[in-house]
């Protein structure tokens, strides 16, 4: 196959996967519109769905998997284009690209969700303090929205707008829960919905929620401090090998040639890459302890 054939194959794979993803997404949306289900505020979504919603990517899991498959297939064809005999290495690189797509999306969403949850807890504490002074729920949310962090400002303003327009509590919180489906948001929504349905004491409920979330935040900080060594080990094991190769090549340009010229050199590199990927994923999994 010529270079043009490889490029055409890459373009065909990307076009086919994107077209299939769009068609399946439209089909799923039509089905969901036909049978609208009531939102469960305490329901936890899968990691990929939650990550895509936190990042504001309104695509289905199948679309994202198709895009990741397209990128991995493109990486495989590019490696085959420049190294025609490196079949195993091309396959390993394609797997690495596929896994990296998931790691980047999930880690970025995890960071943004943790930041949002931290500021939202401050928002709940402000609402609870206003309620304890005798203000109504609408006045408390309006005051909290006025002094909310800029990172939270858009969502708190939209929530207040929906509540002020007369929407019931479940309808008002549905978009927020769909976007940021975390424990703090779900418990706050559950407290407000319970208050509107039974007229119970909302101040004590939010005080209990704040105390519980504060204790959980403290436990998370302690656990994060204990796992800091594992975190740096994962970073160094993932980055350091690729940083040392250009350094060694700069100091000695012939340092890497014996490995590349050896008939088994590609096999050694493939095994090393697999071991590094397995170790990095294992360390990353040990850091993903839910609390």
Image (tube, rainbow, N blue to C red):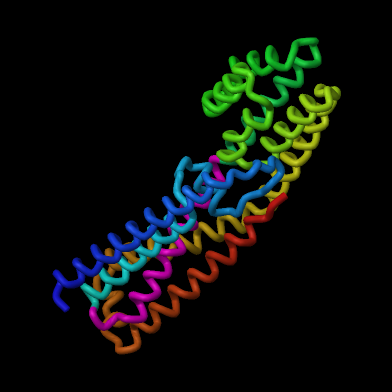
Question: Is residue 87 within the magenta segment?
Answer: yes
Q: How many marks?
A: 0
**x and y percentages locating residue 44 in the rendered image:** 66, 49
Query: Which of the 4 quarters of the picture holds residue 180?
Result: top right
Query: Which of the 4 quarters of the picture holds residue 289?
Result: bottom right
User: In the displayed structure, would residue 10 be above or below residue 58?
Assistant: below
Residue that lies at the very extreme toward the bottom in this rendered image: 263
- Say which quadrant the N terminus sits in: bottom left
Q: Residue at x 70, y 32 (%)?
A: 189
Q: Residue at x 55, y 65 (%)?
A: 281
Q: Between residues 164 and 268, which one lies in front from this camera angle? A: 164
> What secondary structure prevails in the magenta region?
helix
User: In the displayed structure, would residue 105 be above or below residue 75?
Assistant: above
**x and y percentages locating residue 111 in the rendered image:** 55, 43
Question: Is residue 288 within the magenta segment?
Answer: no
User: In the displayed structure, would residue 171 be above or below residue 251?
Assistant: above
The stretch in magenta equals 84-112
Residue that lies at the very extreme toward the top in this rendered image: 134
Q: Residue at x 58, y 47 (%)?
A: 35
Q: Between residues 95 and 252, which one lies in front from this camera angle? A: 95
User: In the displayed structure, would residue 224 be above or below residue 160?
Assistant: below
Q: Residue at x 50, y 74 (%)?
A: 275
């Amino acid at each position: 196959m010529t270079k043009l054939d490889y490029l055409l194959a890459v373009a065909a794979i990307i076009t086919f996967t994107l077209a299939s993803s769009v068609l399946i997404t439209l089909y799923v949306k039509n089905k969901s519109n036909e049978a609208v289900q009531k939102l469960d505020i305490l329901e936890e979504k899968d990691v990929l769905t939650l990550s895509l919603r936190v990042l504001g990517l309104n695509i289905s899991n199948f679309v994202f998997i198709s895009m990741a498959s397209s990128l991995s297939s493109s990486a495989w064809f590019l490696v085959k284009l420049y190294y025609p005999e490196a079949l195993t290495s091309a396959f390993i690189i394609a797997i690495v690209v596929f896994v990296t797509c998931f790691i980047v999306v999930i880690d970025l969403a995890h960071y943004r969700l943790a930041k949002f949850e931290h500021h939202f807890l401050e928002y709940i504490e402000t609402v609870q303090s206003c309620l304890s002074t005798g203000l109504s729920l609408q006045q408390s949310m309006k005051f909290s929205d006025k002094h909310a962090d800029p990172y939270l400002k858009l969502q708190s303003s939209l929530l207040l707008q929906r509540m002020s327009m007369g929407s019931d509590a479940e309808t008002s919180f549905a978009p927020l829960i769909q976007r940021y489906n975390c424990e703090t948001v779900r418990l706050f929504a559950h407290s407000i919905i319970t208050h509107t349905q039974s007229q119970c004491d909302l101040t004590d409920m939010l005080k209990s929620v704040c105390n519980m979330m504060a204790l959980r935040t403290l436990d998370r900080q302690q656990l994060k401090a204990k796992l800091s060594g594992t975190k740096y080990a994962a970073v160094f094991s993932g980055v350091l090998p690729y940083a040392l190769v250009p350094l060694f090549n700069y100091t000695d340009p012939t340092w890497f040639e014996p490995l590349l010229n050896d008939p088994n050199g590609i096999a050694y590199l493939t095994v090393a890459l697999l071991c590094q990927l397995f170790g990095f994923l294992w360390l990353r999994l040990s850091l993903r302890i839910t609390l």
